[in-house]
Amino acid sequence: MAQVKLAYIGGGSTRAPGTVASFIRQAANFAGSEIVLHDLDEDRLDLVCRLARKMAGAQGADLKIRATTDRRAALDGCDGVLSSYRPGGFEARAQDERIPLSHGAIGQETQGAGGFFMALRAIHVARGLVEDMEAVCPGATLFNYTNPVNIVAQAVADHSPINVVSLCEGPIVFPGELAELSGLDPKKVRAVMLGLNHACWSVEAEYGGQPLLPILAQKLEEGIADDWTRRWAELAVTMNSLPASYMKYYHFEREMLAELRARPTTRAQDILADVPRYWQHYREQLDAPNPTLVPELSRGGIFELEVAVDVMDAVFNNRNEIWPTNVVNGGAIADFPDSQVVEVPCLVNRQGVRPISGYRVPKPVRGLLKALGEYQQLAADAAWNGTRRQAVQALTGNPLVRTLPLAQTLYEQLARAHFQHLPERLW
């Protein structure tokens, strides 16, 4: 099994204990490896490191785990780097949600103006991260889990020699989630989804060996009580393809905007309210003889990042497995430029993560996906080295913004809210 050095950038986050639990669960595949946790919050980083060591010891995992606030030291000599960080924390995400909503626009972690400003903040950090990687571990692969994963990967792929692959469970979980919400058995679902991250659609979908869409249509005809599930199923049946759940923001924009504005709190505010109990749970487990993370008390559940660990395993142990990832297209999906980062099934082995060719996105949604692809490129360029004007251009190109006056207003207010996490050229 592979003996490697891995750095986890964001290793002091509320998700980090679950991430390390995923590594420990697969410790046999990484026996003798070293995991270096890095974060800016020294106290939380220390807690996560001590908890990770105790979990590893209790389960007999042959993993060396240490922590440092020195990013370059963490990266030195690494074979792989997992990035999952959030500049500004959930407080910044709350601004991304509230400010657009106050102007009648959707703000979300990866979509609309909120997703755009998350990209600006994330890529500002990513530039320094890959510069450090170029200096001390130029041959390492960046396994990116920082949102918006497609825009971050696009910026790095376009401007750095560092090999980057972005990861998301979406293509794996969306089909089963829709099936289960519609009263079907998610274990019987097999689907292939592709396109862009959080904007993927199925090109194959079966249920127990039979086409899934007619079965879903029957469920829709029988009646689905939940409004959102009914809309999701109706969109799938109408387009004859299973969509990512995030497509609700585009195909039901008015309905989603009304729902979001009617809620007393945003998603980020809800998460912030839960953060203290996450840390309480981690501190309690640190004192337990056999620490065990409870999904309901752990941010994102215990194995939220397991697909990242699976992909690393496939790379370093030469598994020749197929995983959906976000990589440079290279002709795999004919509907996007070769240089576009796309979400597509990939063959994963020691040679890297290579997209499987021969796909087309469903024709009824091709226009919207191409528009999102153009926005993705504009956003990546503006975030990496663009000016404020280029950033406003990119935001205007976002299908959830569209008008120049709205883009200008949202940019002004969000840039003011996040200026400490942005380069001066974007103020």
Image: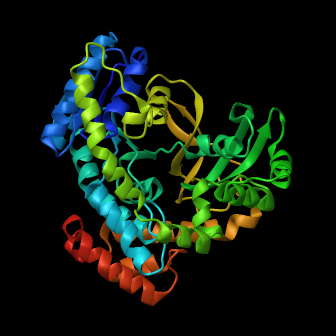
Q: Which residue is located at x 48 percent, y 76 percent?
A: 105
Note whether residue 387 is visible.
Answer: no
Which color scheme is applied?
A: rainbow
Tag count = 0
Q: Which residue is located at x 51 percent, y 49 percent?
A: 327
The residue lying toward the viewer, choosing from 171 and 376, is 171
The residue lying toward the viewer, choosing from 66 and 245, is 245
Q: Which residue is located at x 24 percent, y 39 percent?
A: 12
Vertical arrangement, residue 425 with respect to residue 337, above or below:
below
Note whether residue 151 is visible.
Answer: yes
Vertical arrangement, residue 204 with respect to residue 395, above or below:
above
Q: In which quarter of the image is the C terminus?
A: bottom left
Q: Residue 116 is drawn in which quadrant? A: bottom left
Indicate left or right for 387 with 181 as reference: left
The residue lying toward the viewer, choosing from 373 and 236, is 236
Q: Which residue is located at x 48 percent, y 71 percent?
A: 261
* Residue 86 point in image, percent of width and height: 30, 53
* Residue 340 point in image, percent of width and height: 53, 60
Q: In which quarter of the image is the N terminus?
A: top left
The residue lying toward the viewer, choosing from 340 and 178, is 178
- Residue that sits furthest to the bottom in the current view: 405
Indicate left or right for 337 with 271 as reference: right
* Residue 271 point in image, percent of width and height: 36, 51
Indicate left or right for 94 with 113 as reference: left
Q: Residue 215 is drawn in which quadrant? A: top right
* Residue 34 point in image, percent of width and height: 27, 23
